[in-house]
């Protein structure tokens, strides 16, 4: 199996390292990932400046291509120009921090998988519910690998991707996998006002996450109960119901 791996936390993040290490046991992995932190860039593309693919080494060997662009750029550039063959699977992650509820719209991790889905390639986004760079990624890497392996026999519909969230608890305590829908949870955003050394004010976003309608059948609920949440995501953006009602006017 040929697997393209990317992320949004940057090619040097511990999450992508753990993912690549695990996926190499089941397939041939190529890494094309942003050269810096790109969290919450959503599905942005770089159109006004050139992209460069710089070989990135880790532990003395070639790890992948570092791109001065977004996660969606990495998937597009990787598949169109860097890989010698179309991958069988694209895996994005392991993200440092959950990607649940409507907030997946902001996620660079999920958007990389969305880009692959748009290109007709099976795709998985994987996130661990901890922002810590010291977090134990072994459970998430293990589940990502098991799900990736099952993708070879399961025919994921074109136009659907899998969004996986893994609770940040010791791997041995994970209760298994649960298939879920997005919860209705929301961030309540606040912009903290601070002052720079020149005494000019600046703002930094700081939110509180409110869990709403997050029972055990939802992503946030399953994760809270110690399950690995797997949500099938598709993007049918036309509101068919309102379309029909407008046409009936
Ligand atoms: Mn991220």
Image: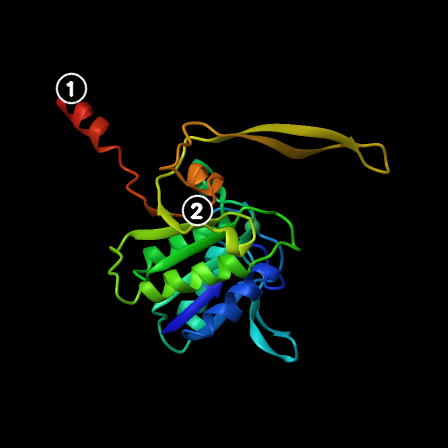
Query: Which residue is more in the foreground, 41 or 230?
Result: 230
- Which of discs 2 and 1 lies nearer the camera? The answer is 2
Q: Which mark is residue 249?
A: 1
Label 2 crowd (10 A; few <14 / some 14-19 / many >=20): many
Residue, x 27% and y 57% (percent of image)? Answer: 156
**Residue 50 in view (yes/no):** no
- In the rendering, at what x and y percent does residue 46 appear? 51, 55
- Residue at which label 2 appears: 227
Quarter placement of the C terminus? top left
Relative to 86, say whether 120 is above or below.
above
Residue, x 28% and y 41% (percent of image)? Answer: 236
> Dividing the picture into quarters, in which one does residue 75 lie?
bottom left
Query: Which residue is more in the foreground, 212 or 89?
Result: 212
- In the rendering, at what x and y percent does residue 32 appear? 51, 67
Structural distance between the alpha carbons of marks 2 and 1 = 47 Å
Q: Which mark is residue 157?
A: none
Q: Is residue 93 left or right of residue 205?
A: left
Residue, x 46% and y 54% (percent of image)? Answer: 126
Which SS class for mark 2? loop
Query: Which residue is more in the foreground, 50 or 174?
Result: 174
Q: Residue furthest top?
A: 249
Relative to 157, say whether 82 is above or below.
below
């Amino acid at each position: 199996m040929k697997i393209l791996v990317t992320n949004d936390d940057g090619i040097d993040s511990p999450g992508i390292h753990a993912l690549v290490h695990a996926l190499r046991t089941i397939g041939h992995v190529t890494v094309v990932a942003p050269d810096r932190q790109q969290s919450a860039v959503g599905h942005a593309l770089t159109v006004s400046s050139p992209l460069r693919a710089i070989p990135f080494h880790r532990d003395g060997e070639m790890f992948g291509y570092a791109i001065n662009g977004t996660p969606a750029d990495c998937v597009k550039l990787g598949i169109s120009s860097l890989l010698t063959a179309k991958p069988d699977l694209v895996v994005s992650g392991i993200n440092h921090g959950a990607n649940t509820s409507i907030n997946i719209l902001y996620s660079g991790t999920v958007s990389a998988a969305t880009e692959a889905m748009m290109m007709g390639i099976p795709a998985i986004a994987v996130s661990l519910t901890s922002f810590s760079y010291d977090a134990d990624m072994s459970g998430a890497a293990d589940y990502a690998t098991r799900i990736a392996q099952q993708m070879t026999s399961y025919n994921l519909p074109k136009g659907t991707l899998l969004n996986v969230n893994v609770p940040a608890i010791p791997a041995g305590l994970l209760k298994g996998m649960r298939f879920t829908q997005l919860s209705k949870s929301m961030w309540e955003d606040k912009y903290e006002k601070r002052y720079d050394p020149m005494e000019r004010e600046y703002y930094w976003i700081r939110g509180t996450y409110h869990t709403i309608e997050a029972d055990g059948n939802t992503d946030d609920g399953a994760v809270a109960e110690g399950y690995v949440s797997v949500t099938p995501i598709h993007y049918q953006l036309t509101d068919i119901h309102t379309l029909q009602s407008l046409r009936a006017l």
